[in-house]
Image (cartoon, rainbow, N blue to C red):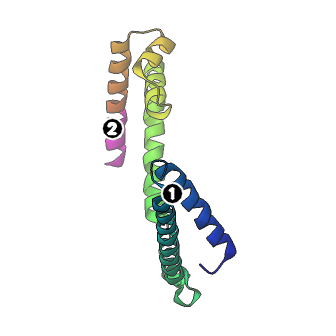
Amino acid sequence: MGETADAEDIVQEAWLRASTGTAKLPAPDAIAYLRMTVRNLALNGTRRKQIEARIFDARDEIEAIGIASDQPDPEVIAISRDEYARIIFALREMPEKMRIAVEMHRIGGKKLTEIAAFLGISKSTAHTLILEGIERCRAIADRMSA
């Protein structure tokens, strides 16, 4: 294995596996099972180290210049800000109960029963408020983007 700590880990792992898998085996078979387990774990560990060495080899490092950024480009940021402004405008134009219901459902992740209880309305009324509120948001956003 190359390192004492890795070998100790393999022996410990093999012992744990053998202690659960050999309870019904006779002593010679249990020893053979333990040896095979140690061997297989050592081979797997060696293969894993070889793969890791190939992946993380400093000579094969990829230049950071060629890696694409996970940050959105300026155009996407501008479009998102514009859409956000339209949604905020649409929410401000809604009646209070409708706005609260939409915010609780879409932003807060609340269930219809929680929204209905908070607003003191029926569950079906809460559902209607949310649907109408979302439609208003879409309509206002569509009008403002045209």
Seen in the image, is 45 located left or right of residue 142? right
Of residues 38 and 102, the one nearer the viewer is 38
Of residues 120 and 110, the one nearer the viewer is 110
Is 31 rendered above or below residue 139? Answer: below
Is 100 rendered above or below residue 13? Answer: above
Image quarter hosting the N terminus: bottom right
**Residue at 54% from the left image edge and 52% from the top image edge:** 19
> Do the residues under discs 1 and 2 have CB atoms within 8 angstroms?
no
Indicate the quadrant where residue 122 lies: top left
Spot occupied by residue 7 in the image (x, y as percentages of width and height): 62, 71
Q: Secondary structure at mark 2?
A: helix
1 vs 2, front mark: 1
**Amino acid type, mark 1:** Ala
Q: Secondary structure at mark 1?
A: helix
Of residues 47 and 86, the one nearer the viewer is 47
The circle drawn on residue 73 is none
For label 2, count other residues whose C-alpha is less than 10 Å away and answer few (under 14), some (14-19) or many (20+). Answer: some
Residue extending farthest right: 4
Magenta segment main secondary structure: helix
**Amino acid type, mark 2:** Arg
**Residue at 56% from the left image edge and 91% from the top image edge:** 59
**Residue at 50% from the left image edge and 31% from the top image edge:** 108
State which tag comes first along the sequence, 1 or 2: 1
Within the magenta stretch, is there residue 11?
A: no
Is 27 rendered above or below residue 146? Answer: below
Spot occupied by residue 14 in the image (x, y as percentages of width and height): 55, 61
Spot occupied by residue 71 in the image (x, y as percentages of width and height): 51, 64
The circle drawn on residue 138 is 2
Q: Which residue is mark 1?
A: 27
Q: Which residues are magenta?
A: 137-146
Is 1 rendered above or below residue 142? Answer: below
Spot occupied by residue 131 in the image (x, y as percentages of width and height): 32, 26
